[in-house]
């Protein structure tokens, strides 16, 4: 006589500050999430409720307050080693038809919901976690950088970041101006303004590990009325820099079930060709080669032409997208990882990219490796 096996437990995984545990209960696959932050748990419950009428999300079967936090039990979607996420489609050698269909479905869903729910609202009404809160006093900009000074790149360019304003920074031969303190001050000022922003109902943190394949959305603590520009900057920086290069380098545990990520890092990490400082002419020279694997380039290109441009044409006709996107992009560059914690070469490359993003000549098409559209966007 065999025992009736009513439940099974899979390996425990850590996702940032949360714990994830696959559980099978009476044939029902569940994903149990434990979070210590009760405010974020409550926001996640509210965010899930707001999204489910507009996007495909796994069912939330139960949420229970427990000592030290919350347990949330979600429907567990099919997946496995190197399966189940947008990430897995991006870890391939070439952008196959499956990826292209996926991005078409993704951008179609976003375009419809964003244009249906878009509204100009005061910043106080949008989800503030990733931008406004991080720029506010005591937020990540302060936590990471208040009263901090560190070398541009130890052993390569030992000049402290506080002195960058005293030098011309020639990035790939283009002379640019960048001041560290001025950039931080500029971002804080931008996110203190009360001018209305265009916002729409989105998940808010559209990374390649928060997007399931087949298409569905995970992680809802930033779901709700989000800045449309913040949504765009988040996806584009993640797919072209964070997801393929920085996150697997500095948070490798997040990819335990997706080991194909690691051989792809070199295909997405920029190459530093040379760096030197001339104190006589007050010039810092940084030469690098932009490297981005074809699947990520294809995803960014389709996202831009099928979503960013059509939505921008409706919400900001005739406006320069570079100027609009800049503060959101700069916040993603500065307020995900503390630049002081990056290895010197990575820090130097990120500072070069930040300098480009903050320059008057910032061009999102070049910056995000956007290719020319194959056909007109619908």
Image (cartoon, grey):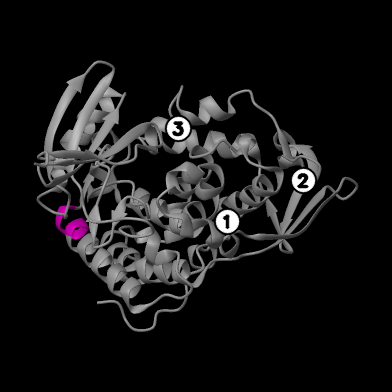
As measured in the structure, the alpha-carbon distance from the residue carrying label 3 to the one carrying label 1 is 22 Å
Mark carried by residue 113 = none
Q: Which residue is mark 2?
A: 167
Label 2 CA crowd tier, 10 Å (few <14, some 14–19, many 20+): some
160 lies above or below 376: above
Question: Relative to 338, does residue 120 appear above or below in the rendering?
Answer: below
Residue 113 lies, in percent from the top left, at: 17, 58
Q: Tag 2's secondary structure?
A: loop
Nearer the observer: mark 2 or 3; the answer is 3
Determine whether 51 is above or below 373 in the image: above
Residue 358 on image: x %, y %? 57, 50
Magenta-tinted stretch: 113-117
Side of 69 where 291 appears, left or right: right
Q: Is residue 345 visible?
A: yes
The residue lying at 45 percent from left, 32 percent from top is: 135
Residue toward you, 259 or 94: 259
- Frontmost residue, 306 versus 35: 35
Residue under the point 38% across and 34% down: 132
Q: Sequence-wise, which precedes: disc 3 or disc 1?
A: 3
Residue 114 covered by magenta stretch: yes
* In this view, the mark in front (3 or 1): 3
Crowding near the residue tagged with mark 3, few <14, some 14–19, many ≥20 C-alpha atoms within 10 Å: many
Residue 366 position in % (x across, y down) = 54, 67
User: Could you tell me how far apart the alpha carbons at marks 2 and 1 are, in whole angstroms?
Assistant: 17 Å
Does the segment drawn in magenta span residue 141?
no
Q: Main secondary structure of the magenta part?
A: helix
Dot label at residue 360: 1
Give the position of the C terminus as an image quadrant. bottom left
């Amino acid at each position: 006589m065999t025992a009736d096996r009513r439940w099974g437990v899979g390996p425990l995984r850590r996702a940032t500050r949360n714990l994830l545990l696959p559980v099978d209960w009476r044939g029902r696959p569940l994903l149990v999430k434990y979070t210590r932050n009760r405010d974020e748990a409550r926001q996640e419950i509210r965010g899930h409720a707001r999204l489910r009428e507009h996007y495909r999300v796994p069912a939330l079967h139960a949420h229970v307050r427990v000592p030290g936090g919350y347990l949330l039990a979600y429907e567990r979607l099919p997946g496995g080693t190197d399966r189940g996420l947008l990430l897995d489609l991006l870890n391939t050698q070439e952008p196959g038809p499956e990826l292209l269909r996926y991005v078409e479905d993704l951008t179609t869903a976003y375009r419809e919901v964003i244009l249906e729910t878009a509204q100009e609202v005061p910043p106080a009404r949008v989800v503030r976690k990733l931008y406004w809160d991080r720029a506010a006093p005591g937020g990540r900009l302060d936590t990471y950088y208040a009263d901090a000074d560190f070398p541009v790149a130890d052993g390569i360019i030992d000049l402290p970041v506080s002195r960058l304003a005293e030098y011309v920074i020639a990035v790939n031969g283009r002379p640019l101006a960048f001041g560290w303190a001025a950039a931080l001050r500029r971002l804080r000022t931008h996110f203190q303004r009360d001018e209305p922003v265009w916002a729409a109902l989105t998940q808010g943190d559209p990374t390649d590990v928060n997007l399931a394949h087949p298409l569905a959305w995970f992680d809802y603590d930033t779901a709700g009325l989000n800045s449309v520009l913040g949504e765009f900057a988040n996806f584009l920086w993640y797919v072209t820099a964070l997801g393929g290069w920085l996150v697997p380098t500095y948070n490798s545990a997040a990819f335990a079930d997706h080991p194909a990520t690691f051989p792809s890092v070199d295909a997405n990490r920029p190459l530093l060709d040379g760096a030197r400082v001339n104190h006589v002419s007050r010039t810092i020279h940084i030469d690098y080669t932009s490297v981005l694997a074809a699947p990520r380039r294809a995803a960014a290109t389709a996202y831009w032409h099928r979503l960013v441009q059509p939505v921008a044409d409706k919400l900001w006709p005739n406006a320069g997208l570079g100027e609009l996107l800049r503060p959101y992009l700069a916040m993603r560059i500065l307020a995900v990882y503390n630049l002081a914690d990056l290895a010197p070469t990575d820090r130097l490359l990120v500072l070069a990219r930040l300098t480009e993003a903050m320059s008057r000549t910032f061009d999102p098409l070049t910056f995000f490796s956007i290719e020319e559209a194959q056909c007109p966007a619908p």
